[in-house]
Amino acid sequence: MKYISHWKLPQGTVNAAIKRFLETGGAPPEGIKMLGRWHGMNGEGFAISESTDPKAMYQWYAQWLDVLELTVTPCVEDAEAGPILAALPKR
């Protein structure tokens, strides 16, 4: 399953978050493949990752909770969403 992670960097945690990112590279734990990560100039960013282990995703999420406001959303690609949307009753 793929996941969209969105983070916001609160003012009070900027230095701690930068330090941790530079030390770890923000690498995910075992069982997660990061497909891409983008940093906005507004202190927010997004990552797309893939994993079959929701506990590994939760572990990664929990490692950053003290310095980032995070939302992690499971997602599907167009090829998966299209047939589902096409099968919806017409309104």
Image: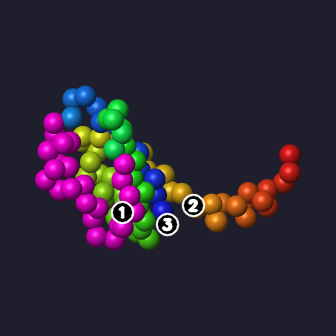
Q: Circle 3: is it few (<14), some (14-19), or many (20+) Cα within 10 Å?
A: few
| Residue at 36% across, 67% down | 33
Where does the image place residue 46, in percent across and percent down from the top left?
Answer: 40, 47
User: 45 or 84: which is nearer to us?
Assistant: 45
Q: Residue furthest front?
A: 41
User: 73 or 62: which is nearer to us?
Assistant: 73
The three-letter amino acid code for the residue at tag 1 is: Met
Q: Circle 1: is it few (<14), some (14-19), or many (20+) Cα within 10 Å?
A: some
Could you say whether the residue bearing mark 3 is in a helix, strand or loop? loop
Could you say whether the residue bearing mark 2 is in a helix, strand or loop? loop
Query: How far apart are labels 3 and 2 at the CA level?
Result: 8 Å
Pointer 1 or 2: first along the chain: 1
Where does the image place residue 7, in percent across and percent down from the top left?
Answer: 36, 42
* Residue 1 marker: 3
Q: Residue furthest right?
A: 90
| Residue at 17% across, 56% down | 24
Query: How far apart are labels 1 and 3 at the CA level?
Result: 12 Å
Regarding residue 63, the answer to whether it shows in the image is yes
Please report the bounds of the magenta region as a residue range.
15-38
Residue that mark 2 sits on: 76
Asked if the stretch drawn in magenta spans residue 89, the answer is: no
The three-letter amino acid code for the residue at tag 3 is: Met
In the displayed structure, does residue 81 sit left or right of residue 27? right
Q: Is residue 87 above or below residue 20?
A: below
